[in-house]
C-alpha cells in the first residue's frame, strides 16, 4: 500500500455521523457497521495522538452534550429535532439545526481548531460541506452506501431509496475534497454514477477488531442457548431488515432442518426500520416454515458476547441483497468460522470464495440450500475453511484502516492548501473548486 512520505497529519479531526451514534449498540435500528467503523477508526487515530471529536445527533434527553469516551475521542451530542421517534427519512428536516449545533460548538474554540472534517453517510456530508466552507479546512467524505447502488437490488417488499437522497449524494460528491470508499467496485461506481474524478477517490478497506474476534471454544455459549455439541449451527448476525435477507437463510435452511434435526439456526440482531422491538415478521416466517423449534432469536449483543456466538457457530450466513463491505463476514472469519455470503458488493473482497467460505450468486433459495447444505454435510471441509477464514481475516485490521484514512486526510490537506487563493487567503476564504460541475443524477 502506498504511503505519503512526510504526510501532513491533522492534530484534530471533526467526524460527523448525524444519524447514528458510535456509542449506540450496533445490530438494531439504524446502528450497524457505520457505528463500528466510526468508533474503531476514531480510537485508532486517537492512539496515534490525533484528537477526534465525533458529532452525532442526540437521541435521548439524558445524552450529555459532550461525552469523553477513551482518551482523545470526544462525542458531541448535538440537539436537533426530537430526541426519540424521528424516522431516518425525516432527518433531512433537521440538518439545519444539526449544522447550527456543529458550527456553534466550533465557534467556542480557538481559530483553526479542526484540521479536517470527515463526514460519514450523505446526511453528514451535507453538514460537513458547510463546516468545510466555514472553517476553511478540507472535507473527506465516506458515503458508506449509495442510493443508486442500493436501488439496483431492492429486496421484495422493500422501499427504494428516494431521489432526494441521490441528489444529496451527488452534491456531496461534487463538494468533497476527497472521497473514501471500501472497495474498487465502489470507486468505479462513484465514477460511473456520480462522475467523481478518480484521483479524488481513496480506497480504504474496513477492518475487524482482531483482538476481540479470534478463534476459540464456543461450547459454553452452546450450552447456555440449549444447543448440543453435535448440532450444526448456522448463524445470521445483523440488523433485521429486508436488505439483509435473513428470510433467505430461513427458507434455505427449512429443507435442511427437515432432513436433519441437528441443523439449527441462530438469528442475532434487532429489527431495523419497522419500529418494532422484536423481529416479529421473521419469527412468523420461521413458524410458517415449520422450523421455529430449530431457530433461536437473540437480541443484539456487544462484541465481547458476539465473538462467543461466532465461535459457537459452524457457519455464518450473510445473504444480503446489497452490502458495501460486510463487517460481520470479516468478524466471523476472524473467529475461525466459514462464511456463506451473497456475491454482492464488498462481500466478494471480505470472503475468499472456495477457501474461507462460499459466495453464492443471487438469492435463489435452491442455490442457498445447496451451498449451506454442502458445507453442513462436509465437516472436514468446514474445518479447513474455518482455519483459512481465520488466516484470511488477518489482513483486515482497524489499525490499517485508520492508517489509510490518515493518508487520505494528508492528501486532502495537501490538495486543499493548493486551492487557497493567495489574494484571499488572508481573509480565510478559499477559491471555489474549479472542478465543481453541474449535478447530474440518474433518476
Ligand atoms: N453487531 C453487533 N451486535 C449485534 C449485531 C451486529 O455488534 O448483535 C455489529 C457487527 O459486529 C458489525 C456491525 O454490527 O460490526 C454490522 O456491520 P455490517 O457491515 O455487517 O452491516 P451494516 O450494519 O453496516 O449494514
Image (cartoon, helix red, strand yellow):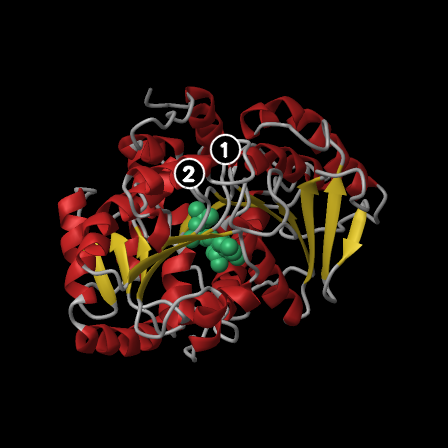
Between discs 2 and 1, the one toward the N terminus: 2
* Residue beneath disc 1: 273
Residue 277 appears at what percent x and percent y?
Answer: 56, 39
- The answer to whether residue 68 shows anywhere in this view is yes
Label 1: few (<14), some (14–19) or many (≥20) C-alpha neighbours in 10 Å: some
Which residue is nearer to you in this view: 220 or 4? 220
Label 2: few (<14), some (14–19) or many (≥20) C-alpha neighbours in 10 Å: many
Q: Quadrant of the C terminus?
A: top left
Q: Which residue is located at x 57 percent, y 54 percent?
A: 38
Q: Which residue is located at x 59 percent, y 46 percent?
A: 138
Residue 419 appears at what percent x and percent y?
Answer: 55, 43
- Taking the image as shown, residue 44 lies to the left or right of residue 2, namely right
Residue 170 appears at what percent x and percent y?
Answer: 44, 29
* Residue beneath disc 2: 241
Which residue is nearer to you in this view: 200 or 285? 285
In the image, the residue with mark 1 has its CB under 8 Å from the nearest atom of ligand 1:
no
Residue 100 appears at what percent x and percent y?
Answer: 75, 31
Which residue is nearer to you in this view: 189 or 162? 162
Rendered image: mark on residue 441: none
- Taking the image as shown, residue 66 lies to the left or right of residue 224, namely right
Secondary element at tag 2 = loop
Asked whether the residues under the numbered discs 2 and 1 touch, taking CB atoms below 8 Å apart as contact, a structural biologist would say yes
- Against 142, is 10 above or below? below
Amino acid at each position: 500500500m502506498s504511503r505519503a512520505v512526510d504526510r501532513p497529519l491533522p492534530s484534530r479531526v471533526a467526524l460527523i455521523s448525524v444519524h447514528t451514534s458510535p456509542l449506540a449498540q450496533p445490530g438494531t435500528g439504524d446502528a450497524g457497521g457505520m457505528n463500528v467503523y466510526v468508533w474503531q477508526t476514531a480510537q485508532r487515530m486517537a492512539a496515534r495522538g490525533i484528537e477526534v471529536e465525533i458529532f452525532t445527533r442526540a437521541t435521548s434527553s439524558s445524552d450529555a452534550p459532550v461525552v469523553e469516551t477513551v482518551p482523545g475521542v470526544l462525542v458531541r451530542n448535538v440537539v436537533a429535532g426530537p430526541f426519540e421517534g424521528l424516522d431516518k427519512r425525516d432527518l433531512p428536516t433537521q440538518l439545519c439545526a444539526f449544522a447550527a449545533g456543529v458550527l456553534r460548538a466550533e465557534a467556542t474554540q480557538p481559530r483553526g481548531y479542526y484540521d479536517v472534517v470527515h463526514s460519514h453517510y450523505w446526511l453528514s456530508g451535507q453538514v460537513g460541506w458547510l463546516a468545510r466552507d466555514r472553517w476553511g479546512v478540507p472535507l473527506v467524505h465516506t458515503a458508506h452506501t449509495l442510493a443508486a447502488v442500493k436501488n439496483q437490488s431492492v429486496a421484495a417488499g422493500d422501499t427504494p431509496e428516494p431521489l432526494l437522497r441521490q441528489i444529496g449524494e451527488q452534491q456531496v460528491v461534487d463538494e468533497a475534497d476527497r472521497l473514501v470508499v471500501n472497495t474498487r467496485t465502489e470507486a468505479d461506481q462513484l465514477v460511473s454514477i456520480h462522475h467523481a474524478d478518480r484521483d479524488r477517490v481513496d480506497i480504504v478497506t474496513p477492518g475487524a477488531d482482531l483482538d476481540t474476534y479470534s478463534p476459540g471454544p464456543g461450547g459454553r455459549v452452546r450450552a447456555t442457548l440449549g444447543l448440543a455439541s453435535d448440532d450444526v449451527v448456522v448463524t445470521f448476525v445483523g440488523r433485521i431488515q429486508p436488505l439483509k435477507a435473513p428470510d433467505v437463510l430461513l427458507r434455505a435452511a427449512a429443507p435442511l432442518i427437515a432432513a436433519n434435526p441437528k441443523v439449527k439456526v441462530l438469528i442475532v440482531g434487532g429489527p431495523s426500520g419497522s419500529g418494532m422491538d422484536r423481529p416479529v415478521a421473521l419469527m412468523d416466517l420461521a413458524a410458517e416454515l415449520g422450523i421455529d423449534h430449530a431457530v433461536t432469536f437473540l437480541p443484539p449483543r456487544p462484541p465481547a458476547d458476539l465473538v462467543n456466538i461466532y465461535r459457537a457457530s459452524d457457519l455464518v450466513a450473510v445473504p444480503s441483497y446489497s452490502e458495501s463491505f460486510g463487517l460481520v463476514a470479516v468478524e466471523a472469519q476472524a473467529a475461525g468460522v466459514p462464511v456463506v455470503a451473497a456475491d454482492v458488493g464488498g462481500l466478494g473482497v471480505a470472503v475468499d470464495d472456495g477457501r474461507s467460505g462460499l459466495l453464492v450468486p443471487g438469492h435463489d433459495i435452491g442455490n442457498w440450500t445447496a451451498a449451506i447444505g454442502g458445507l453442513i454435510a462436509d465437516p472436514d471441509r468446514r474445518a479447513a475453511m474455518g482455519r483459512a477464514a481465520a488466516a484470511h481475516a488477518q489482513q483486515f485490521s482497524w489499525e490499517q484502516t485508520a492508517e489509510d484514512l490518515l493518508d487520505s486526510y494528508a492528501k486532502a490537506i495537501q490538495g486543499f492548501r493548493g486551492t487557497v487563493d493567495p489574494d484571499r487567503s488572508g481573509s480565510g476564504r478559499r477559491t471555489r473548486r474549479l472542478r465543481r460541475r453541474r449535478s447530474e443524477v440518474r433518476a
